[in-house]
Image (cartoon, rainbow, N blue to C red):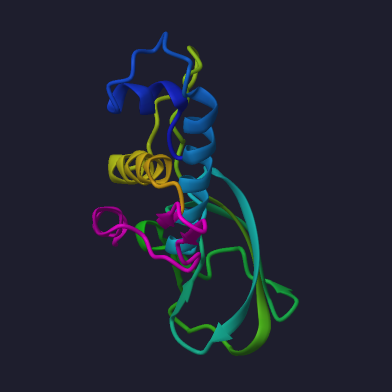
Amino acid sequence: MLTTLQRAKSYLSIPLDDTSQDFTLLTALGAASEWIERECNRSFEYKTYRQTLDGPGTKFLRLRNFPIHSVSLLHVDGVDKLEGSFTIESENGMLFRRSGWPHGARLIEVEYLAGYILPSDAEDAPAPTLPQKYEWACVLLAQTLMREQGVTSERVGDISVTYKDEGRSLPGAVKALIQL
């Protein structure tokens, strides 16, 4: 998750000893984290990723997850190209190759370490490196999800309920926070 229960409670001014909303808040934080990652089309967790990519035919190869910390495997059309043939453009998730990347379907296989150290409530956890804007976006979206019950209208006589469209978009403030 892009934040923790304790950190979210602190941001939302919920006393840490108040556990009455913990399950709902945790569920909303999990949903918000997944929604933000889906919207950004990337994972934020610091870990090893593996991708098979089409060759772009340009000097830059964009990897899905970033920042890139290292590349442990690089095969181009089945040939190992790990040694000195590229440079890492860490912050924008690209590998630069002066001679260019070949053009073609599913030619490039890359294994790489990327992402951020996510917030943790554990005492011995390393300091998070996730930009705070993503954590704030997660808390804001979780708060919105908890507030909205999914019902847009109700009527008591002859009982009628209208639910929100499931294809809704992110709130404007969340979109503003997660834009690159």
Image location (x, y in percent) of residue 128 = 40, 31
The residue shown at (30%, 40%) is 136
Give the extent of the magenta segment.
151-180
**Is residue 168 visible in the rendered structure shown here?**
yes
Q: On the image, which quarter does residue 154 sit in? A: bottom left
User: Residue most toward the front?
Assistant: 157
Comparing 179 with 73, the one in front is 179
Comparing 119 with 90, the one in front is 119
The residue shown at (52%, 46%) is 31
The residue shown at (37%, 28%) is 8
The reply to whether the magenta stretch includes residue 177 is yes
The reply to whether the magenta stretch includes residue 79 is no
Q: On the image, which quarter does residue 139 sit in? A: top left
Image location (x, y in percent) of residue 52 = 67, 72
Q: Quadrant of the C terminus?
A: bottom left
Image location (x, y in percent) of residue 95 = 47, 68
Q: Is residue 66 above or below residue 64?
A: above
Q: On the image, which quarter does residue 13 sit in? A: top left
Q: Is residue 165 above or below residue 103?
A: above
User: Residue most toward the top?
Assistant: 17
Q: Is residue 30 above or below residue 13?
A: below
Comparing 59 with 174, the one in front is 174
